Each structure stands twice: as structure tokens, then as C-alpha cells.
Image (cartoon, helix red, strand yellow):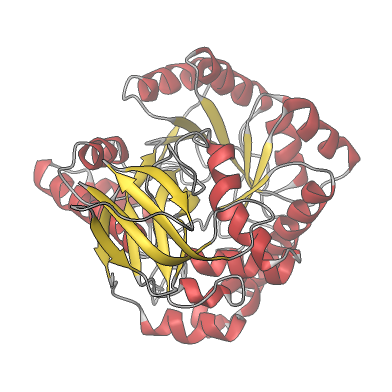
């Protein structure tokens, strides 16, 4: 059966998209069959009258960690101990897997039809991806990296990242991850805000350049690209010099680093959401030290500066939330678009394009999704109001469609403290 979405205002996901009123989008077997303003549904077609509502591509979130909700905690969690507890035995693994499945579903219900996971527990992400693809559970399209590779004392080491102590261990770990059939490889090159030891020096280089090169060589030989956590200029430079394909988070850049971006055909993934609470909220809310707040601001300004400089040079910039960090939930991708607009200074239209068609191109799935075009997957986000006028229109979707399957009036559980405090930053 074909489904015709009639009387919609179409936002097609292109860079210069303008609202196209009174359009019809026809879907069949999960694919977009045709689009037009003069299409007449055939007898037997399922007709969905959108009454002028806005139909756009589903959002794509390029930086997700599934093993956490993003709900703020009263005290900092020992992520290594928490991961060890989840992976303790078959029963705890089953509970952990179900938790991650629910968080993936939350992404979908919020209008995100594709996610890229960049550090998870064991091979949970690949299992969930395969179950979604088989129609066994509800979830978004998933590009997964499973566990990341870090170093002893490195970022997320022992929780969602393995610890490599040599070049050979890097190669062995990457090969073991590849055996689980991931879509990407993730490495942790620098530290982050919370594990920094000096004021003004977040993102200290942790992974030696030779380790980075070893990871990238193994991944590229298997046809996989590499995403790297890098939150300092030195970390970004080392990443690019040694083969990394996407810089996650980023830092202040100079002409040398920009030249490396161009030479390596690399991309920047902008993630303002995790840095903003540390930089903007009171220490009582984030339970942070003065050093954490200072470093949080350094990282936030670095991410913003990297995005601005990359865009000015024509270097692709994508968007992700870094969900699972405090105050960064699985239902708030729309906020990352807002921050991109507010702090990087792009138009609302460009923010929407970045979170759809541009993100799809960066992820290598632009032939499958990211825009409303005949032949592509029927991945739709439908809103009551125009997101071009107000990105907040994305906050509560009217309908989400994933590979042709409709979710009408989707609802997710939200955290009141997150809503209250993050709304102050709009």
C-alpha cells in the first residue's frame, strides 16, 4: 500500500530550502515514491492529511552515547565502575541492553531518525542496530562504533573505551571491534573537561601520535572511517596528521590545522550541548569546581571557534549532541541546532540543513536519507509550526516517520530540571 502525505508544507533539507506549500509526498515500502503539488492519491492509497503542517527530513544526530540518559546527577558518577557493573553477568547485560534500546527509541520519538554512536558498552550498539534493522524493536537508523579505543588514564578508558598501551594493542583492539561489524571506529585522543588536571588546559593529549596512526591504518584498511574525541588544538592537529576523518568537539584552530582539514578531507562535528552547562550554569547545578567551569568555557569557545573557522573555509561541519553528558538528553537534538544558530551564527535554515542533508553526507549515507527526494528512505519529521521561523517547533513533533513507519504524536519522558535550566539558554 502507498501512503500519501497531502497538504504538507515541505522543507526538503537542501541548503537553500524554502517552504513549499500544499505539497504531497508519496511513500511506498519505506521509500519516497514521488513528490509534487499536483499529485492525486490513487484509490486504495492510505491518505494522511497534514493540514499545512511542516514535513522535513528526520534529524540526524552524529554524536551519541547510548549508555546514559543525560539526566543531571547529584554527584559525579564513576563511569568505569558503572560500566563494570552493567557488564558483570548475563542478567546485568540484559538490563543494560534494554536500557540502551530505550534510549535509542527516545532519539527516534524526538524526531531523530538516524544516530551515529561513538562509544558504547561492549557490542550493545551493533546488537541494537541489527534488531532495529530486522524490525524486532523500534529505533532510529544506527551507525555504530561500539567500544572506542583510549589509553590507560585516557578519556572514558574502562567504561565505553578500551585501554591500549602500545601500537600493537591499538591494532589488536581495532581489529577486534571490526570483527563485530561496526560502521565507524572511535578513538579518544585527548582528555576532556571533567578529567582535566590544570586550569586552562582541558583536552590534554593522551594518545601518542603513533597510536592514532595505528588505529586509523587498521580502520581504513577495513574500509571504515575514524572519529576522534579531540578537545585541544594539539589533539586536533595530531588527529588530522595521523588519519582521523571526523574531529568530534574540536578546539581553537590556526591556519595549519585548517590546511590539514582540507588536505585530509576531514570534517568537524560541532557539539555545543555538553560544554554549555559547565560554562553557563551555577556550580550548585553542575556540582562543578571553579576549574571545571573555567575549562568548560575554554572547550565551549573552542568548539564554536572551530565550527566558525571551518565553515568560513568551506570545511564540512556536522552536528551531534554528545548525549549522556549531564544535561544532554536523548530528546534534545533540537537544542543543538539552536546553539549552532545562536553561537556559531548560522541561519535557522542552515542549521536545519546541517542536521539533515549535511549530516547525511558526512556520515556517508546521503544516497539513503537526509533529504526529501524520490528514491530515498521515507524518514520524516512533521511539526505543527515552521522550524525555519522557530527551531523550537522541533521540540514536540506532531509525527515521526522512519522508513515509512508512522509514529503519531510521539511523546517522551522529559526531565523537569533539564527543561527548566536549558530553556534559560534559548
Q: Position of residue 350 (x, y in %)?
A: 67, 59
> Can residue 188 be seen in this snapshot?
no
Q: Is residue 298 above or below residue 228?
A: below
Left or right of residue 72: residue 91: left
Q: Position of residue 309 (x, y in %)?
A: 82, 51
Q: Can you say whether 184 is above or below 416 in the image?
A: above
- Residue closer to the observer: 217 or 406: 406
Nearer the observer, 322 or 90: 322
Which quarter of the rendering shows the C terminus?
bottom right
Q: How many marks?
A: 0
- Residue, x 79% and y 26% (percent of image)? 263
- Identity of the residue furthest to the left in this view: 91
Q: Quadrant of residue 410?
A: bottom left
Nearest the eye: 417 or 83: 417
Looking at the image, is 149 positioned above or below residue 243?
Answer: below
Residue 285 is left or right of residue 289, and the answer is left
Q: Residue at x 35, y 60 (%)?
A: 5
Q: Residue at x 31, y 25 (%)?
A: 180
- Residue located 39% across and 50% down the image: 379
Whole-percent x and y of residue 133?
Answer: 25, 37
Residue 39 visible in this rendered orientation of the protein: yes
The percent position of residue 152, horizontal first and vertical second, equals 50, 36
Amino acid at each position: 500500500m502507498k501512503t500519501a502525505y497531502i497538504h504538507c508544507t515541505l522543507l526538503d533539507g537542501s541548503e537553500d530550502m524554502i517552504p513549499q506549500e500544499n505539497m504531497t509526498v508519496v511513500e511506498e515500502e519505506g521509500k519516497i515514491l514521488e513528490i509534487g503539488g499536483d499529485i492525486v492519491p490513487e484509490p486504495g492509497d492510505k491518505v494522511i492529511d497534514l493540514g499545512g503542517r511542516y514535513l522535513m527530513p528526520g534529524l540526524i544526530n552524529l554524536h551519541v552515547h547510548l549508555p546514559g540518559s543525560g539526566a543531571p546527577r547529584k554527584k559525579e558518577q564513576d563511569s568505569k565502575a558503572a560500566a563494570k557493573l552493567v557488564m558483570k553477568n548475563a542478567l546485568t547485560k540484559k538490563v543494560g541492553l534494554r536500557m540502551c534500546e530505550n534510549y535509542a527509541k527516545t532519539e527516534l520519538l524526538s524526531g531523530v531518525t538516524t544516530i551515529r554512536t561513538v562509544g558504547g558498552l561492549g557490542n550493545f550498539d551493533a546488537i541494537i542496530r541489527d534488531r532495529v534493522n530486522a524490525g524486532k524493536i523500534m529505533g532510529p537508523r544506527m551507525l555504530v562504533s561500539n567500544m572506542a579505543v583510549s589509553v590507560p588514564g585516557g578519556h572514558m578508558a574502562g567504561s565505553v573505551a578500551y585501554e591500549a598501551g602500545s601500537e600493537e594493542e591499538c591494532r589488536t583492539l581495532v581489529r577486534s571491534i571490526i570483527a563485530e561489524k561496526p560502521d565507524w571506529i572511535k578513538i579518544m585522543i585527548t582528555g576532556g573537561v571533567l578529567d582535566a588536571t590544570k586550569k586552562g588546559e582541558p583536552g590534554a593529549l593522551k594518545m601518542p601520535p603513533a597510536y592514532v596512526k595505528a588505529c586509523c591504518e587498521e580502520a581504513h584498511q577495513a574500509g571504515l572511517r575514524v572519529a576522534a574525541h579531540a578537545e585541544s588544538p594539539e589533539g586536533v592537529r595530531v588527529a588530522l596528521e595521523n588519519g582521523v576523518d571526523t574531529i568530534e568537539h574540536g578546539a581553537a584552530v590556526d591556519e595549519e590545522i585548517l590546511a590539514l582539514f582540507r588536505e585530509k578531507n576531514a570534517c568537524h562535528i560541532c557539539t555545543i550541548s555538553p560544554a554549555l552547562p559547565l560554562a553557563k550554569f551555577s556550580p550548585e547545578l553542575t556540582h562543578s569546581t571553579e576549574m571545571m567551569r573555567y575549562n568548560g568555557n575554554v572547550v565551549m569557545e573552542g568548539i564554536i571557534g572551530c565550527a566558525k573557522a571551518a565553515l568560513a573555509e568551506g570545511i564540512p561541519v556536522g552536528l551531534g549532541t554528545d548525549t549522556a553528558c549531564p544535561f544532554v538528553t536523548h530528546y534534545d537534538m533540537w537544542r543543538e541546532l539552536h546553539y549552532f544558530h545562536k553561537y556559531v551564527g548560522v541561519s535557522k535554515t542552515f542549521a536545519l540543513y546541517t542536521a539533515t542533508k549535511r549530516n547525511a553526507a558526512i556520515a556517508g549515507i546521503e544516497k539513503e536519507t537526509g533529504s526529501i527526494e524520490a528514491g530515498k528512505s521515507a524518514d520524516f519529521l512533521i511539526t505543527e509550526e515552521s522550524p525555519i521561523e522557530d527551531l523550537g517547533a522541533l521540540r514536540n513533533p506532531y509525527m515521526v516517520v522512519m522508513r515509512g513507519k508512522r509514529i503519531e504524536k510521539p511523546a517522551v519522558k522529559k526531565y523537569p530540571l533539564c527543561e527548566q535550566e536549558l530553556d534559560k539558554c534559548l
